[in-house]
Structure formats: structure tokens, C-alpha cells
């Protein structure tokens, strides 16, 4: 995370007991569903994102405070974020940025909304709405708009045909269950 | 970097992909040969920023107003040489700087005869509690070896500031003993697609 989107200082992060309890519950549930993954929370960070990474044999998912404690973010977005990052570790197919340990964005999304949510619901019966998750995440993206959204989102020349490369197409595909097509690789 | 959305991280993915490509497969073999026969690329006299500039290992895509290339060179030139996690070099008993930790890990990767490494995977993670940038797990033992793959993770206390940018060292400012580097940054050329008609013609022949 060298170039990350930071929640502006004027936005107060949600440090309520209720939010921390929700995070504790979600993290404890997902740790039981996917015990192979080390789930970590960096509450002091204002980065509005989450991350999957492999530290040698240890597979980790990190949730940053700018996303986890953002006032717009709710349960559905947190579930999706955790499952998407877990999907980077478990999804099969194309790899992310030539890293053999992490699956591409589209593969991680598809895994999250099929295998991932299926296993979580089977274990804990948790309700989940992708539409609500996408709305919450979209609102966060809008709130950190500015230089951050110019991002690899809209390069001068499109270099990839992956539907997960731009938030607009990704949102549509996720909400309409059009995630069966996987790109050759996400960051070409 | 496997992030939830690529706001801000497009450049991270680009640089990660370039580094991963350069340090795997035939490109890594070329670098290992270069290191063995021509130039010790990561010795004390060599600079990481000069290596990246020579090998074209930096962001080149358009990220709007975000000067990702400038920030990358600011990290290499201005942050990493002064950063340390406080762990000591067992020989000198001095703190290991993060630049030197990266050089040590990359030298390990290039010494194929001794270490047999055939791939390096780069990553970066934010850790708000960290005092400085360092290489996971610690600077005096940088990188994690899994089989023949070396995993190099840069731990960052915070994302880079927008205003902190620097330029790559130019060709007028070389490192001592530079030899022409093998091409490790260009993408593999796409194979020419052969249509059905051409295939049938070839079969007939």
C-alpha cells in the first residue's frame, strides 16, 4: 500500500462500541469459517481499503480503519470486503499482478459471491445483500473522490478487458450476477 | 496487493507486476547471469533507484494528477535509505537500513548457485503502528523463502504523500561499474494468431 485512498480528515471515522462489536462478530465468524486465513484489523489506518497478502506460508487479510470504520459502511460491505480478500487466496484461475499466490480481482469477486458467501451462510446463517454492499462501497468511493479516483480506473488508454477493473462495470456485474466471465488477467 | 478496490492502488499493482515479472522466469535468469558475470547489482556502491531507472521498473501509466512515478522514486531515494526497524547487523552491530535490507534480499535472489531462487514476489502492506518502512519480518533477516520463491514485503507506516516526489537518477549519474542490463521490463510479445484458413492451408501443404 504505497498509493492508497485516505479518508479525508473532515470525515470522522465511526469508533462506536456498536461498530467495534459488529467487526468483532464478523471477524470471529469468518475466522471460524476460513481458519487457514489470518484476519487482521488496522483500526488506526485511514486507508479506505482492505488487502490480501501472502507472507510466505501465512495467508493474511487486512482490513484498514478507513474502510472498516467509515460511517457509510455497513454489515453487507464489510462481509463483501472480507470475502473478496479471502477470494484472492482461494479462487482458482488467473493470478493478480503476476503473483502466483493471489487470484485476480474478478476471480476473487466470483469466489466471494459463490463459494465464500455460501460457506459463511451455511455456518452462521448470515443474511447478505450484494446490492446494499455495492451501494455502501460506492458511497465510500465517491467520498474519497478527487485525485484518488483518477487512479488506474481511467487510464488514457484502456489496457484491460476485465469487468472488475472499473467500479462502474464491476458494480453492474456484481449486482446482476454477471461474474462468470473471468478476464485473462486484471492488470495487463 | 490484492486490494478491495483499486482506488489509489492502480500504481501499486503496476509496479508490483513489473517487479514480479522482472524477478521471475527467464528475466530473473538473465539478471542472475548479469550478477554472476558482469556486475554486482546490489552491492554497497549501487543504488536501488538507479537500478530501477536503468531497468525501467517504475509506474508509467496515467494516474491523473497522481505522480506515481515521482512518488516511487521519492520512496527509493529519500525514504528507504533513512528508514530502519532498529534491528542490528550481526557483523557491524549497526541498525540495518531498509535500502540495505532490500539489497541483501535481492542479492540472495540473484545468487542462484548458492540459493537456487527462481522467483521473487514483491508486496507492500500498511501497518499504522510501524515507526518506519521496513522489510518483513525484519531488516536484518529480510524476506521469506518458501521453496524456491522469495517473498519480499515492504511494511509501510502510511501511504506516500502526494507532494513527496523525486526524479530517477539520470544516465549522467551512473553507479560505478555499470554494464548494459538485460531487458527485464518489456512485456512478452503476443503470439501471432493464425486463422482457420491459414491453418487449413498449412495442413494441405
Image: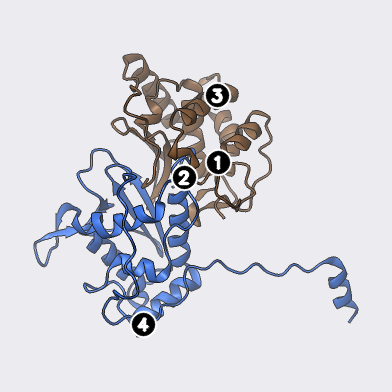
Chain colours: A brown, B blue
Mark nearest the camera among 2 and 4 is: 4
In contact (CB < 8 Å): disc 1 and disc 2: yes
What SS does tag 4 mark?
Answer: loop
User: Where is residue B5 drawn, in percent x and y?
Assistant: 49, 38
What SS does tag 3 mark?
Answer: helix
Q: Chain of mark 4?
A: B
Seen at 53% across and 48% down, the residue is A103
What SS does tag 1 mark?
Answer: helix
Is residue B74 visible in this depiction of the protein?
yes
Q: Which residue is mark 3?
A: A135
Q: Identify the image quadrant of residue A71.
A: top left
Q: Which residue is mark 1?
A: A108
Seen at 42% across and 35% down, the residue is A49
> Same chain, marks 3 and 1?
yes
In contact (CB < 8 Å): disc 4 and disc 1: no
Seen at 46% across and 41% down, the residue is B3
Q: Chain of mark 1?
A: A
Of labels 3 and 1, earlier in sequence is 1
* Residues at marks 2 and 3, CA–CA distance in whole angstroms: 21 Å
Mark nearest the camera among 1 and 2 is: 2
Q: Which residue is mark 4?
A: B179
Is residue A36 visible in this depiction of the protein?
no
Q: Which residue is mark 2?
A: B2
> Same chain, marks 1 and 2?
no
Q: Residues within 10 Å of mark 3 (few under 14, many from 20)?
A: some
Of labels 2 and 4, earlier in sequence is 2
Image quarter hosting the N terminus of chain A: top left
Amino acid at each position: 500500500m504505497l498509493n492508497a485512498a485516505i479518508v479525508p480528515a473532515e470525515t470522522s471515522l465511526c469508533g462506536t462500541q456498536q461498530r467495534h462489536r459488529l467487526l468483532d462478530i464478523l471477524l470471529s465468524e469468518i475466522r471460524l469459517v476460513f481458519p487457514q486465513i489470518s484476519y487482521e484489523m488496522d483500526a488506526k489506518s485511514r486507508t479506505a481499503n482492505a488487502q490480501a497478502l501472502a507472507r510466505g506460508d501465512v495467508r493474511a487479510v487486512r482490513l484498514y480503519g478507513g474502510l472498516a470504520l467509515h460511517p457509510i459502511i455497513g454489515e453487507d460491505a464489510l462481509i463483501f470486503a472480507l470475502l473478496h480478500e479471502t477470494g484472492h487466496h482461494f479462487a482458482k484461475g488467473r493470478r493478480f499482478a503476476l503473483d502466483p499466490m493471489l487470484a485476480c480481482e474478478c476471480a476473487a469477486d466470483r469466489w466471494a459471491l459463490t463459494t465464500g458467501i455460501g460457506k459463511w451462510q451455511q455456518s452462521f446463517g448470515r443474511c447478505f445483500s450484494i446490492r446494499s454492499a455495492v451501494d455502501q462501497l460506492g458511497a465510500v468511493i465517491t467520498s474519497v473522490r478527487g485525485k484518488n479516483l483518477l487512479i488506474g480506473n481511467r487510464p488514457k488508454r484502456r489496457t484491460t478487458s476485465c469487468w472488475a477493473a472499473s467500479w462502474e462495470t464491476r458494480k453492474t456485474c456484481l449486482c446482476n450476477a454477471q461474474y462468470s466471465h473471468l478476464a485473462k488477467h486484471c492488470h495487463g | 496487493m490484492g486490494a478491495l478496490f483499486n482506488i489509489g492502488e492502480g500504481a501499486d499493482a503496476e509496479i508490483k507486476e513489473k517487479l514480479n515479472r522482472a524477478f521471475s522466469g527467464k528475466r530473473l535468469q538473465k539478471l542472475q547471469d548479469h550478477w554472476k558475470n558482469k556486475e554486482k547489482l546490489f552491492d554497497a556502491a549501487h543504488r536501488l533507484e538507479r537500478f530501477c531507472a536503468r531497468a525501467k521498473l517504475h509506474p508509467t501509466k496515467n494516474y491523473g494528477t497522481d505522480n506515481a512515478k515521482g512518488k516511487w522514486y521519492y520512496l527509493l531515494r529519500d525514504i528507504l535509505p533513512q528508514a530502519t526497524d532498529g534491528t542490528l547487523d550481526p557483523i557491524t552491530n549497526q541498525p540495518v537500513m531498509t535500502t540495505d535490507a532490500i539489497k541483501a534480499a535481492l542479492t540472495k535472489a540473484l545468487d542462484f548457485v548458492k540459493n537456487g531462487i527462481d522467483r521473487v514476489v514483491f508486496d507492500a502492506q500498511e501497518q499504522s503502528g510501524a515507526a518506519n518502512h521496513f522489510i518483513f519480518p525484519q531488516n536484518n533477516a529480510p524476506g521469506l523463502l518458501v521453496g524456491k520463491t522469495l517473498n519480499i514485503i515492504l511494511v509501510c507506516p502510511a501511504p506516500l504523500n502526494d507532494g513527496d516526489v523525486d526524479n530517477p537518477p539520470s544516465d549522467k549519474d551512473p553507479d560505478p561499474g555499470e554494464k548494459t542490463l538485460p531487458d527485464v521490463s518489456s512485456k512478452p510479445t503476443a503470439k501471432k494468431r493464425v486463422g482457420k484458413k491459414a491453418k487449413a492451408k498449412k495442413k494441405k501443404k
